[in-house]
Image: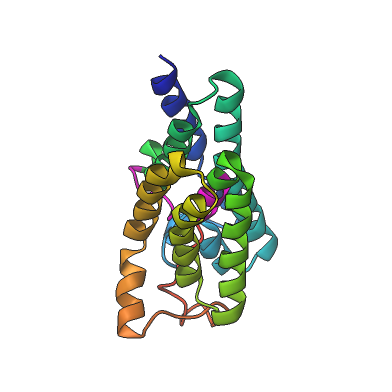
Amino acid sequence: MPPLAALLLGYPLGAIPFGVLLTRMTGAGDLRQIGSGNIGATNVLRTGRKGLAAATLLLDLAKGLVAVLLVASIWPGEQPLAAAGALIGHCYPVWLRFRGGKGVATLMGVALGLHWPLGLVFAVIWLGLLAAIRISSLAGMAAAISTPVTAAVLGEFDVVPLLMALAAIVLWKHRANITRLVDGTEPRVGRSKSDAAGDAAGG
């Protein structure tokens, strides 16, 4: 049953809460009790440890990439199910009562694994917008939305429906950020911890 196996392999890999594990291991506290309570890199940054936040981002990206590549080597052709499992695992990890991250970094890893130019475009849009507007949630959502569009432009039509579904999950996880963006109250990266209490995109 390769399709089910691919999904079941991707889910636990994606569900590894690296942000929670790293902050606990380094004595930074329980990430779920800090800032927004999100388990991604943006919230890890609120601990004041930039290196820890960077490590969280890279590991969240890597687990999406590894899930896809591992399944590609075992069950070629089942990579989309591994990708879906990894992102769902990150956003809804069973051992955190399904309260996970927002999926941006993991979606980038998944995109890299499925077709590396997708991940490259994702990174350019995500990091470029983040540098330009300093709103982490908006940059992450824009990158997520761009992924199925990029896949269609590159002729990778077989993964377009999957990427549309994964982008929709990322947007759903950002629904509170969307409300703040509409209200004009979404903070920018670099503000004080009190000003940035609601901003949590990266993971």
Q: Specify whether residue 30 is in view.
A: no
Q: Nearer the viewer, residue 168 or 149?
A: 149
Q: Which residue corresponds to the image point at 64% horizontal and 55% vertical from the top-left? A: 120
Question: In the picture, residue 96 is in which quadrant?
Answer: top left
Image position of 23 with respect to 176: above or below: above
Q: Which residue corresponds to the image point at 50% horizontal and 76% vertical from the top-left? A: 135
Q: Which residue corresponds to the image point at 51% horizontal and 26% vertical from the top-left? A: 77
Q: Nearer the viewer, residue 130 or 120?
A: 120
Q: Residue furthest right?
A: 51
Q: Nearer the viewer, residue 30 or 46?
A: 46
**Residue 102 on the magenta span:** yes
Q: How many marks?
A: 0
Percent coordinates x, y for residue 76 in the rendering? 55, 23
Q: Nearer the viewer, residue 66 or 193?
A: 66
Image position of 188 with respect to 70: above or below: below
Question: In the picture, residue 4 is in which quadrant?
Answer: top left
Percent coordinates x, y for residue 192 in the rendering? 53, 82
Magenta segment: 97-109
Quadrant in the picture for the N terminus: top left
Percent coordinates x, y for residue 180 in the rendering? 33, 77
Q: Residue furthest bottom?
A: 184
Question: In the picture, residue 189 is in which quadrant?
Answer: bottom right
Image position of 121 with respect to 87: above or below: below
Percent coordinates x, y for residue 117 in the rendering? 63, 50
Residue 201 appears left or right of 76? left
Residue 118 appears left or right of 1? right
Q: Which residue corresponds to the image point at 51% horizontal and 63% vertical from the top-left? A: 43
Q: How is the image coloured?
A: rainbow
**Residue 90 on the magenta span:** no
Q: Specify whether residue 92 is in view.
A: yes
